[in-house]
Image: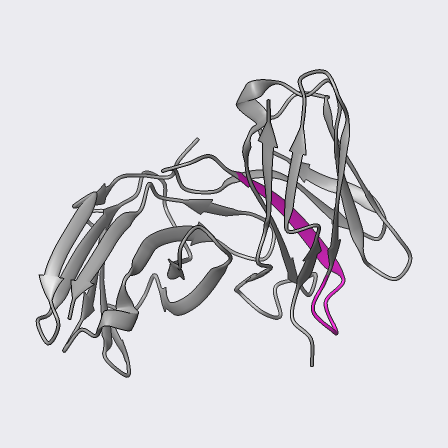
Amino acid sequence: SQQGEEDPQALSIQEGENATMNCSYKTSINNLQWYRQNSGRGLVHLILIRSNEREKHSGRLRVTLDTSKKSSSLLITASRAADTASYFCATGGYQKVTFGTGTKLQVIP
Amino acid sequence: DAGVTQSPTHLIKTRGQQVTLRCSPKSGHDTVSWYQQALGQGPQFIFQYYEEEERQRGNFPDRFSGHQFPNYSSELNVNALLLGDSALYLCASTPWGGAQETQYFGPGTRLLVL
């Protein structure tokens, strides 16, 4: 079963704009992760935020976590055409990763 | 340093046949997990192998089985294929014990069942 829902399911923006996608999860967590998937291929790990953190940055990525609402958001600033991909939130660690349903991002040049 | 590798990249089978997918973990990793990703969905956990034993299993029928070899590589076997088994199959590796909190994914094997 999926861990939760991601919102929106699809997002189309112009190059240079910011993209925000949201994730809700169901169970208590130790950490939450975001992955990117290009054209239905392998998943690339982007960023991990621990349950005791509220915000984390990595380059053009900003992730927030609200454990009271069981939700997280991923912000990609100054988007590029190369950011076109599906983005998944995920919970779990080395034993099992449970993924959300994903947001399909299209960045138009 | 090679990452996670999977073979083959694509595969076409017919209903009722059997298939074997292969995975080599990232160097230094001893734990391999398999995931099934149907079109338009997020990956779903099938099972995990460590020390040549299945350690955890998701909600998949016994038609899905696996194996891990002494060199940590792994196989996923699916018997009596159904149309619904058409999916991208992803392998992920990590060191056992939580030293790394993330898993590293391979490029996947796309299986089409006709």
Q: Is residue B26 magenta?
A: yes
Residue B38 image point, x, y percent = 46, 34
Residue A103 image point, x, y percent = 26, 49
Magenta stretch bounds? B25-36
Q: Residue at x 52, y 56 (%)?
A: A93
Residue farthest to the right, as pictured: B70
Residue A67 to residue A78: above or below = above
* Image quadrant assignment for residue B114: top right
Residue A32 to residue A1: above or below = below
User: Who is closer to the viewer here, A56 or A86?
Assistant: A86
The answer, for residue B31, to whether it is visible in the render is: yes
Is B44 positioned to the left or the right of B1 in the image?
left
Look at the image and tell me in which quarter the N terminus of chain B lies.
bottom right
Residue A104 image point, x, y percent = 26, 50
Q: Residue at x 60, y 59 (%)?
A: B106
User: Who is closer to the viewer here, B111 or B106?
Assistant: B111
* Image quadrant assignment for residue B3: bottom right
Q: Is residue B27 magenta?
A: yes
Q: How is the image coloured?
A: one colour
User: Who is closer to the viewer here, A24 or B61?
Assistant: B61
* Image quadrant assignment for residue A26: top left
Q: Residue at x 23, y 56 (%)?
A: A105
Disc tally is 0
User: Who is closer to the viewer here, A85 or A22?
Assistant: A85
Q: Residue at x 75, y 23 (%)?
A: B79
Is B28 positioned to the left or the right of A64 in the image?
right
Is A9 positioned to the left or the right of B59 in the image?
left
Residue A78 image point, x, y percent = 14, 78
Is A77 positioned to the left or the right of A5 in the image?
left
The answer, for residue A67, to whether it is visible in the render is: no
